[in-house]
Amino acid sequence: MSSQKGTVLITGASRRLGLYNARRLLEAGYRVIATFRHHSSGIDELKQAGAVVLQSNLDETRSILNLIEQVKSITSDLRAIIHNASGWISDSDNPQDNEPLAHLFKLHMEAPWLINRSLYGLLKNYPETADIVHMTDYNALRGDEHYAAYAATKAGLESLTRSFARLYAPKVKVNAIAPYLIIMNDHDQLAAAENTLHIPPMGLEPGEDVIWQSLSYILHNPYVTGTTMPVDGGMSLR
Ligand SMILES: NC(=O)C1=CN([C@@H]2O[C@H](COP(=O)(O)OP(=O)(O)OC[C@H]3O[C@@H](n4cnc5c(N)ncnc54)[C@H](OP(=O)(O)O)[C@@H]3O)[C@@H](O)[C@H]2O)C=CC1
Ligand SMILES: Nc1nc2c(c(=O)[nH]1)N=C([C@H](O)[C@@H](O)CO)CN2
């Protein structure tokens, strides 16, 4: 599988930002390998548009390793890997419940770790510079009183961004995109209704395209690596 613009692997493409960016990658002429956990109408749409869609539970090591082997059997090179899959999971009230942390460690750190290291050879095979992009979060290094496991594992992913950037230069660039609220989830809707949602200087809910614009910039800039790009409406000014 190859195209003049190369093959891009994007995880968590069943809905919202992952689905939107997978669509935009297809429209831009890339070949797309899109992963999903739970099937959705969006996955059917991507398949009809020519994407290869692969099911994978990225919090299960065996499933991650199986996905890696499937990708290797599909293509001999990769233009980019976009780690979008994520869980917006709050901490447990039970102090002895480690499930959120264990789950999000696998999803936000182990999956990118295994996939990047196992598929680096495919990125290296791409005839021009290749990319790895990690979706992190505005709160990664700030922490969050109710989403500590989420923030900590996103911070770990942000650290992996810099380690892999050092390791893989100059053949592969590695960058992160750290959004604040792009499109609301149920929790945000509730917080907005209760007037407890922090509103950035640029206002709320810019929509998915601001992430596509950032992703496109990273893919087209041959000199940007090891960075974390804030897309937060000015929240860092607060
Ligand atoms: N939306 C926003 O405003 C913000 C988003 N971000 C980050 O941007 C990225 C996209 O955000 P958004 O679209 O809102 O994310 P969502 O939470 O809406 O969707 C995440 C995607 O990851 C998949 N996923 C979740 N758990 C697993 C798993 N165990 N194995 C495989 N896939 C899994 C989901 O699949 P399934 O459909 O099966 O659940 C879904 O496709 C994420 O990394 C997020 O952390 C950061 C800050 C703000
Ligand atoms: N995987 C997800 N991560 C995040 C989401 C989401 O819906 N899925 N949403 C947010 C919030 O919008 C936050 O930025 C503001 O409350 C953060 N991460």
Image: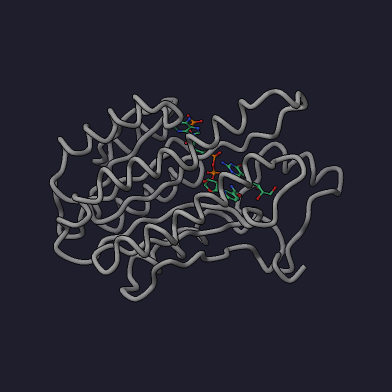
Q: Nearer the viewer, residue 150 or 195?
A: 150
Q: Nearer the viewer, residue 141 or 58?
A: 141
Q: Quadrant of the C terminus?
A: bottom right
Q: Nearer the viewer, residue 103 or 96?
A: 96
Kindly identify the residue that appears in the image at 19 percent across and 57 percent down: 124
Kindly identify the residue that appears in the image at 56 percent across and 48 percent down: 154
**Residue 24, x across and y down, in percent:** 37, 54
Q: Is residue 203 left or right of residue 212?
A: right
Q: Is residue 132 left or right of residue 171?
A: right
Which quadrant of the frame does ligand 2 lie within?
top right
Q: Is residue 75 above or below residue 98?
A: below
Kindly identify the residue that appears in the image at 45 percent across and 64 percent down: 213
Q: Is residue 44 left or right of residue 157?
A: left
* Scheme by which the image is coloured: one colour
Q: Nearer the viewer, residue 222 or 13?
A: 222
Kindly identify the residue that appears in the image at 73 percent across and 63 percent down: 200
Q: Is residue 10 left or right of residue 79?
A: right
**Residue 109, x across and y down, in percent:** 47, 42
Q: Is residue 205 above or below residue 238?
A: above
**Residue 169, x across and y down, in percent:** 29, 67
